[in-house]
Image (tube, grey):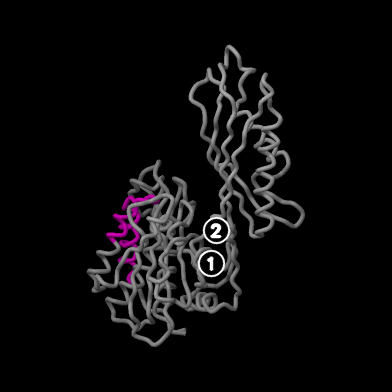
Amino acid sequence: MPQPAPINNSDAVKLVTTLMQIPGKSGFERDVAETITGLLRDAGVPARSILHDAANSRSPRGGQVGNLIVKLPGTLRAPRRLLMAHIDTVPLCVGCRPVRRGPLIESRDADTALGGDDRAGASVVLNSVLHILRHNLPHPPLTLFFPVQEEVGLYGARFVSLSRLGKPRMGFNWDGGAPGLAVVGATGDYNIEVTVDGVASHAGGHPEDGISAIAVASLAIADLTENGWHGLIEKGRNRGTSNVGIIQGGDATNVVTPKLTLIAEARSHDPKFRKRIVAEFQKAFQRAAKSLRNTAKDSATIHFDAQLKYEAFVLSENEPCVQTALAAVRAVGLESGTRISNGGLDANWMVAHGIPTVTLGCGQQDIHTVNEALHVESYLQACRIGLQLATGSD
């Protein structure tokens, strides 16, 4: 691979700072998409090359806009490449005011996250193409893909209009982590939704006539925790995780709560073991329901639903996109390596769609927290890697 083309560090930092301060939590990405579109149009990309698909109309979250997709013809005869990074952030980033402090960019406000996840990734993709256009650099056919709603279930990548992507042979995704480590695999995840239907009664006058949905859920969660099916799960050689993340129920302290809804997740790289975790959740709630009876000998009713959010994947290190990514890392002077992620990535769905996709980091730290920061030099290294991949042909 040829020597890396120089990037303008100042422009790259200005770009990521601009994108991070635009509000755009999941489902509300229109403003950031319009900013990206404006920068591309100003650089000479024709309007016909820029489009939104209808992923938001298929997503259970709805949303303002679908995925932003940009298709550029190549100046080199080579297979099409996909460069991608999601443009939504978690709600904690809304209102962010980025500020440079030494080697880091941080949020000026102590109660706001930065949004480097994943505006830094989007900036890597955008900076690469803007640099190509400004300097008229040769490049293969390129598709830029800016998915929406990654943070709430990878819905943009899941529901992308594949025909709009132009049949890329390999994909490169930018998200969290170090720039030199290529993520070649990621875990799978089930979404679990449980409704507990108990029986209401006066909590002071006749609590024995009621069945508390909260008590049933508490017993089930205690059962899962005691038997090693909640949190980090290690059963022999099998590994996984689970988490009860959302509980909603109850309106008053003087009413035995008749109904509760709960949302949880179950993750594992092994599909069979992941299904086992889901089954243990269902059994725990059924046991808890049967263990509580009111004076009429009634018990609670459990409504249990589990849906696959995304499947696990592992790419061979011999996969062309992996080898190409590692070569680009080495070309900018970094030591290359691979890793497997215990989190989900848009790459999970791209691989499922038949587009081998490797994920590279761009310097984000402590994402989804008010301590989030972007390590500037790591981000700039990611930009150099992005330019390598956007201009390569092998």
Corner quadrant of residue 201: top right
- Looking at the image, which residue is at 56% across and 56% down? 343
Residue projecting furthest to the right: 236
Amino acid type at circle 2 is Tyr
Q: Nearer the viewer, residue 42 or 209?
A: 209
Residue 173: image location, x then y, percent: 46, 67
Q: What element carries label 2?
A: strand
Determine whether label 1 and label 2 are within 8 Å by CB. Answer: yes
Q: How crowded is mark 1: few (under 14 residues within 10 Å), some or many (20 or more)?
A: some
**For residue 352, which numbered disc appears in the image?**
1
Corner quadrant of residue 12: bottom left
Asked if residue 359 is positioned above or below residue 142 in the image, the reply reads: above
Asked if residue 257 is positioned above or below residue 360 in the image, the reply reads: above
Q: Mark 2 points at which residue?
A: 310
Residue 265: image location, x then y, percent: 58, 48
- Name the magenta segment's main secondary structure: helix
- Looking at the image, which residue is at 60% across and 45% down? 243
Amino acid type at circle 1 is Ala
Q: What stretch is highlighted in magenta?
A: 8-35
Residue 378 belongs to magenta span: no
Residue 172: image location, x then y, percent: 46, 71
Asked if residue 368 is positioned above or below residue 121 in the image, the reply reads: above
